[in-house]
Each structure stands twice: as structure tokens, then as C-alpha cells.
Image (cartoon, rainbow, N blue to C red):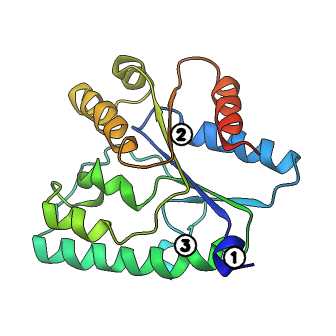
Amino acid sequence: MSSKAKLGRLIVFLGPDGAGKSTLLALVEAELTTRSTYCRSYYFAPGFLKRYRPKGAASITANPHKGRQYSSLLVIAKITLMLFEFCMGMRRVQKQHDILLFDRFIHDLLVDPRRYRMDRLRWWMRAMLALAPKPDLLIVVSAPADLIHSRKQEVSFEETERQVIAYKALAEQFSNSLVIENTGTPEEAATAVITHMDI
């Protein structure tokens, strides 16, 4: 058996704040655990470098776009560091688990670069991110913009609306993707994900 066959499946959850990514991921992880699937969840990065390792209880981001945006030189440096983190870290953690679940991932930069202090998406940023590990399954968690914005108002309604469209467009760029319209119960959304995963 090749080393590639031994690597765990990489499942990534993306979507606007308030779409329900974290809740859905937790339900999927719980269901996989009941099926004796060796899985683990991460936030954004695999934690190869110390700076990307969890630092205790997650804090609520009141304004993800607040703060100084980086210059082009700093953006290049940050993406380079991220690529090192993801390329080195992913293979290590994929060898340790059957399935890895990520709440956000490096491809989140393609939709919301301002969250990562990168101002706007440039063509050379897209070219750099093409070098990142690709998810085996990309799940975009979505809902009508007014519903999402009623849950969280970290960004303007217009930005929420833009992100809803942009995340769905991103899903179309991946060969294996699933868009979940999270308008029912979280359990219904989790069932749809598990069914698509065919575990």
C-alpha cells in the first residue's frame, strides 16, 4: 500500500461567521466517534509551528476586520509561513488519524483576506495558495445572508452577503465539495454531511 493511501481524509468546513460551522463540525465529529472512526478536529491550522497551536479556550472575535492591514511584503511573508505550516503539518497529522476536520483552513484567505490582515486578494496571493494542501472534501456551510447576520454581526450585512456568494463560488473550484444550506436543525445538516462522506 502506498504512503498516500495511509493518509487520513482531510475535511474542511468554511463559511461566514454565523453560518454554524463550529456546531456542525462538533456534531459530525461526535457521530464519527460513535462509529469508531479515529478523527480529530482543528481550528484553521494543523499546529506544526508553535504559533499555530491552540492556546486554550477560544475567544469570540468581535470584529475580525479590525486592525492594521499588512503591506505586500508582510503578506508574502505571512503566506509563506502559512504554507510552511500547512505543508509540513498536514502530512504529519494525516498519518495519525483516519479523518481530520478543520474549522476554517488556509483557503479561507481566498474569500476573506481582511480577516488575516491581507487587505484584499491579489493574483499572486492566489498563485501562492495554489501550493497549499487540498482538502479531500470542502464543505461550505451557508444560509441566507439575513439569517446569518441575525446570528452574528461581526461584519456588515453587505460583507456577509458578499461572503455567502464568494464561499459558494469557492466550492465550485474544488472537485469534491458540498454546500450545506444550514437553515434547518444542526442535526439535519450533520446527517447530510455524514451521508455525503459515505462513512
User: The disc labelled 2 sits on which kind of residue?
Assistant: Lys
Q: Nearer the viewer, residue 132 or 34?
A: 132
Does residue 76 appear left or right of residue 22 in this picture?
A: left
Question: Where on the picture, by quarter, is residue 105?
Answer: bottom left
Image x and y of residue 104, in percent: 47, 53
- The image position of residue 32, as x and y in percent, is 79, 47
Eyeballing the image, is 161 above or below 169? above
Q: Distance between the residues labelled 1 and 2?
A: 25 Å
Which residue has dot 3 on it?
53
Residue 115 visible in the shown view:
no
For the point 40% across and 42% down, which residue is it? 171
| Residue at 65% from the left image edge and 71% from the top image edge | 94
| Chain-order first, disc 1 or disc 2 | 2
Residue 60: x %, y % from top left: 47, 46
The residue sitting at 35% across, 30% down in the picture is 153
Q: Which of marks 1 and 2 is in front?
A: 1
Residue 23 spot, x, y in % from top left:
62, 37
- Under mark 1, the amino acid is Lys
Q: Which mark is residue 95?
A: 1
* Label 1 residue SS: loop
Q: Depth check: give the residue in front, 53 or 194.
A: 194
